[in-house]
């Protein structure tokens, strides 16, 4: 049986989430926009779910918009604000280690006439605050910096950045897809104007996302999808009620057991790293060891290819980087950004731990890696040159 250490790519659906969804897949099927009794009942339950999500984030219920994914939420926030505020300015700021859902959106907006600054990060994978301050201009309208990186787990100083943005009349969005469920995420504490996350990273199904939009901004966001007046007029289309119920339950569980989950997941990650670094020579962790979420360990195994190790250690489900770029033969843009060794970075693997992993799996995974790293290094021309 495989050992699933790829929770940052997607997480299994929690049984408690699945159970609350089932009635809305069969018995409770009415359209929440219908005015008959069944429709109004579904609408009430949908709005209750919206309130549950808002409660986790410290937001108002009316500030929660349901979408189809984290990528859609990112696109909606960034494009929607850029188009809505383009008369105020056309300068945008992001970092060079963002998820492709953010980076590709900014590249698209460059073609639309916007000017984008891509901030570099240090070797730990963190944006320098002074560089950030210097990048803000009079025509800057939007900053988008992720809360936690999806490949190396580093946490950005979003709260400090958001304060700077507010002082300069600039709007700030953060992609919290990887952060939610691993650390406290409160929009009031962070001070951001927009925040996005996805259901399938927090033990809800694929196909549901959330966008938080500060109430003061809602009238300025240009919708991506036009049609009916669903989701406060920002996202047309009949709501995906079963999945909304599911993501709300996932948020409720996070609120109840975040401390318990993060402690357990962090323990497993640290146990894994300790054994790998002590028992497998020529290995190291990429990015910061302290300022990162509890779930991600990105480790370089020198002298071998990461893809080859995944094939040999096929019992372990892990990743060579972001799942959204797994069809690319290029090395990770995140590892390039933190100045990783150009040869070593091809031997990097991301292991990401979750709620349903256990210590026995972690120890078995390390044993499997030890055996197969040794095999591959015996065949490696890189090893023979050392």
Image (cartoon, rainbow, N blue to C red):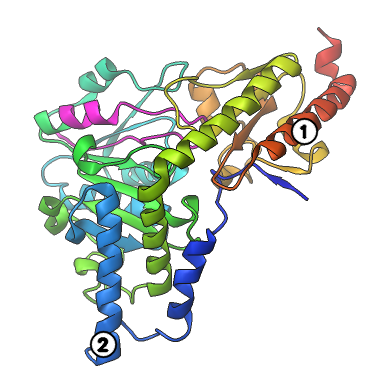
User: Which SS class for mark 2?
Assistant: loop
Q: Which residue is mark 2?
A: 34
Q: Is residue 327 left or right of residue 354?
A: right
Q: Which mark is residue 140?
A: none
Would you identify the image quadrant in which residue 290 lies?
Answer: top left
Above or below for 335 versus 8: above
Marks 1 and 2, Cα distance to the nearest angstrom? Answer: 54 Å
Would you identify the image quadrant in which residue 314 lies?
Answer: top right
At x 25% / y 69%, what residue is drawn? Answer: 47
Between residues 63 and 226, which one lies in front from this camera angle? 63
Between residues 343 and 61, which one lies in front from this camera angle? 61
Instruction: Give the x, y percent position of residue 223.
Output: 25, 62
Quick check: is 278 in the magenta stretch? no
Would you identify the image quadrant in which residue 222 lies?
Answer: bottom left
At x 55% / y 40%, what residue is drawn? Answer: 322
Region rendered in magenta: 139-164
Q: Which residue is mark 1?
A: 309
Quick check: is 152 in the magenta stretch? yes
Instruction: Give the x, y percent position of residue 57.
Output: 27, 48
């Amino acid at each position: 049986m495989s050992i699933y250490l790829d929770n940052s790519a997607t997480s299994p659906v929690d049984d408690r989430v699945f159970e609350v969804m089932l009635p809305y897949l069969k018995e409770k099927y009415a359209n929440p926009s219908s005015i008959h009794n069944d429709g109004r009942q579904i609408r009430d339950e949908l709005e209750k779910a919206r309130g549950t999500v808002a409660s986790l984030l410290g937001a108002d219920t009316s500030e929660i918009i349901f979408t189809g994914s984290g990528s859609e939420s990112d696109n909606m926030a960034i494009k929607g604000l850029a188009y809505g505020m383009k008369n105020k300015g056309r300068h945008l700021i992001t970092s060079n280690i963002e998820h492709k859902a953010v980076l590709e959106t900014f590249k698209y907006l460059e073609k639309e006439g916007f000017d984008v600054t891509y901030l570099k990060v240090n070797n730990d994978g963190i944006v320098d605050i002074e560089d950030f301050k210097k990048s803000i201009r009079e025509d800057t309208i939007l900053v988008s910096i992720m809360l936690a990186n999806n490949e190396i787990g580093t946490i950005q100083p979003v709260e400090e950045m958001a304060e700077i943005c507010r002082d300069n009349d600039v709007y700030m969005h953060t992609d919290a897809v990887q952060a939610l469920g691993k650390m406290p995420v409160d929009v009031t504490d962070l001070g951001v104007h927009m925040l996005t996350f996805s259901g399938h990273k927090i033990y809800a199904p694929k196909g549901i996302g959330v966008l938080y939009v500060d109430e003061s901004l809602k009238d300025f966001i240009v919708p991506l999808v036009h049609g009916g007046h669903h989701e406060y007029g920002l996202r047309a289309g009949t709501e995906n009620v079963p999945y909304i119920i599911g993501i709300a339950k996932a948020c409720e569980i996070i609120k109840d057991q975040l401390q318990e989950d993060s402690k357990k997941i962090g323990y497993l990650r640290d146990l894994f790293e300790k054994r790998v670094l002590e028992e497998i020579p020529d290995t190291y962790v990429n990015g910061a060891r302290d300022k990162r979420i509890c779930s991600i360990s990105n480790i370089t195994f020198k002298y071998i290819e990461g893809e080859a190790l995944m094939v040999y250690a096929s019992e372990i489900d892990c990743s060579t980087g972001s799942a959204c770029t797994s069809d690319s033969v290029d090395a990770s843009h995140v590892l390039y950004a933190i100045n990783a060794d150009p040869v070593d970075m091809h031997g990097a693997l991301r292991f990401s731990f979750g709620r349903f992993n256990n210590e026995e799996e972690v120890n078995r995974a390390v044993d499997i890696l030890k055996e197969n790293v040794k095999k591959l290094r015996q065949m490696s021309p890189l090893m023979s040159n050392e």
